[in-house]
Image (cartoon, helix red, strand yellow):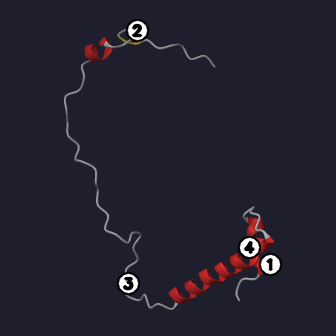
Amino acid sequence: MKVSAEDVKHIAQLSRLTVPASEMEVFTEQFNQILNYADILEKIDTAGIEPTPYVLPVSNVLREDVVKEGVSHEEALKNAPAVHNDGFKVPRVIE
């Protein structure tokens, strides 16, 4: 075994987790299974394989930017609850 119960206790302590004694054996076995799988992956010959950050092709799903007519200044102020100096009047911010 690569990981012992003491290792699991130490990892749990570092992670600020409480592992009940009844589950210690299960966690120890699971850690060892993960490490065994990592050993299998380590043996795979990856020479000539390009590294890639994504396993699926990535494409931009956003629409193209389209220039549209905006709202006029007068139209924007038409729905304002209060106007001051040709702009929106808002409550004063006091710190």
Secondary structure under the numbered disc 1 in the rendered image: helix
As measured in the structure, the alpha-carbon distance from the residue carrying label 4 to the one carrying label 1 is 13 Å
Q: Residue at x 37, y 84 (%)?
A: 49
For disc 1, the marked residue is 6
Crowd band around label 3 with a 10 angstrom C-alpha radius: few (<14), some (14–19), many (20+): few
For disc 2, the marked residue is 82
Circle nearer the N terminus (1, 3)? 1
Q: Of circles 2 and 1, which is in front?
A: 1
17 left or right of 38 in image: right
> Residue 65: x percent and y percent?
23, 43
As measured in the structure, the alpha-carbon distance from the residue carrying label 2 to the one carrying label 3 is 64 Å
The quarter of the picture where residue 6 lies is bottom right
For disc 4, the marked residue is 23
Q: Of circles 4 and 3, which is in front?
A: 4
Crowd band around label 1 with a 10 angstrom C-alpha radius: few (<14), some (14–19), many (20+): few
Quarter of the image that includes the C terminus: top right
Circle nearer the N terminus (2, 4)? 4
